[in-house]
Image (spheres, grey):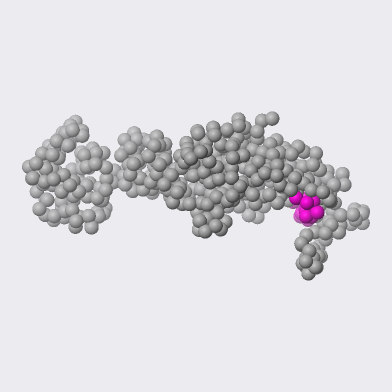
Amino acid sequence: MTLRTRFAPSPTGFLHIGGARTALFCHLHARAHGGTTVLRIEDTDRQRSTREAVEAILGGMHWMGLDPDEGPFFQSAHHERHLAEAHRLLAEGRAYRCTCSVEELDAMREEQREKGIKPRYDGRCRDRDPASLGDASSVIRFKTPRGGEVAWNDLIQGEIRFDNDELDDLILVRSDGSPTYNLAVVVDDYDMAITLVLRGEDHISNTPRQIHLLEALGYPRPEYAHMPLLHGADGAKLSKRHGAVSVLQYREEGFLPAAVNNYLVRLGWSHGDQEFFTMQELERLFDVTRLGRSASIFNQEKLLWLNGQHMRVADPADLAKELSWHIERQGLPHPGQDRLLAIIPHFQERSKTMVEMLEKCRFLLVDQLHAYDDAGIAHHYSQALRPAMEDLCKRLKDLEQSLWELPHVEAVFKDVLAGHQLKMGKLAQPVRLALTGTTVSPGIYETLILLGRERTIDRLERFLSIVQ
């Protein structure tokens, strides 16, 4: 049987890092086993579901390279199908109408608490004659088997067992006629031929209920794999303060999708001592059965380190795509693909994020500098250096555009150094300040070549006019 797994987010917010990890694991396991991924948007909560959230989920998955093989499908489109199956169970005597009011249920639970009993529905409508209920407002409840237990071999957690007597009769259809989560999920998983349900361990309590529904409906049981949740460094469940923010916020902060995927997969999964993985390696090696059972700690610093590693070895064309996105987002002039491919290799080793790369190469994208590092000027420039800088500017003007290449630029620079009896550092830093506005850039000759003849001369002259 072909492996089919699904990612089923609710469109009530952005795709956060925990949800992204689930989507990633579904994708990787399917790829490693020749399977298929399905994206199902569980939008049955009409009040909280939004189109903006759907777009955020799709955008986050696309950025991470996790576009599904099938979908997105919307759970709300199968509303009639869900209700039909609930009414089939009702007709077969596997479900029943319950007319208990909210007040009656509240009183029942309060009485149970007073007696030290776990609050739950006590099945008081289970054996009532349906004909006696008339047109009273009701829900449809499932007749959970009594006695015995339900068990499954979880691919991550191992064998899990629940006593049936610990489970009450769950609601399948609400009084307003809308199907509930557990019913919709079971029917959709069957209709979409899902063979592996991979999700967070917070869904373990839903699984015995869903297995009972599967059996009552005559559906085959998929395999289950419940992933441990992510925690912050303080041991608490991952929240916004730990980094559980939108996946696209990580893009805004300059992270690469390859690094985010690499980091997320290492939260609970390993392959020897290897830390660095390409997506191609992960799609070949990953298996959910090798996930640990303990909660994983999300560490932003480790992600930052890993991002730097990926930036160093990335194809400049891949970085150009991300750098272009950041350039456009900041409203900077785009220099063109060929220009970016020439710029990027000079900054890969120097940057841990794409935001940092953009800041370091910003001087190459703008026509004029609008600010200089004042502390750098105070430290590196003095009027005694002015003659040398003026001489350098004149000599560079005399260098024809056709000769604006590294050997010729280097020769001019060295002639000026020799003529003014200066060491490289004495002249290179004020020149770097004039050209970039900062004291950090690629090598000074490379900086001149990257900036180009006209901009180099213009910035030297402008700097000299400012620092009178």
Q: Is residue 415 magenta?
A: no
Q: Is residue 466 visible?
A: no
Is residue 381 found left or right of 25 in the rendered image?
Answer: left
**Which of the 4 image quarters holds residue 38?**
top right
Q: Position of residue 160 (x, y in %)?
A: 71, 47
For image coordinates 53% across by 46% down, the residue present is: 267
In the rendered image, the quadrant that contains the N terminus is top right
256 and 312: which one is in front? Answer: 312
For image coordinates 58% across by 33% down, the residue present is: 31
Q: Is residue 167 magenta?
A: yes
Q: Is residue 376 above or below residue 403?
A: below
Is residue 1 found left or right of 96 in the rendered image?
Answer: left
Q: Position of residue 68 (x, y in %)?
A: 58, 37
363 and 236: which one is in front? Answer: 236
Which residues fall within the magenta stretch?
Answer: 162-178
Q: Is residue 21 above or below residue 69?
A: below
Q: Is residue 163 visible?
A: yes
61 and 230: which one is in front? Answer: 230
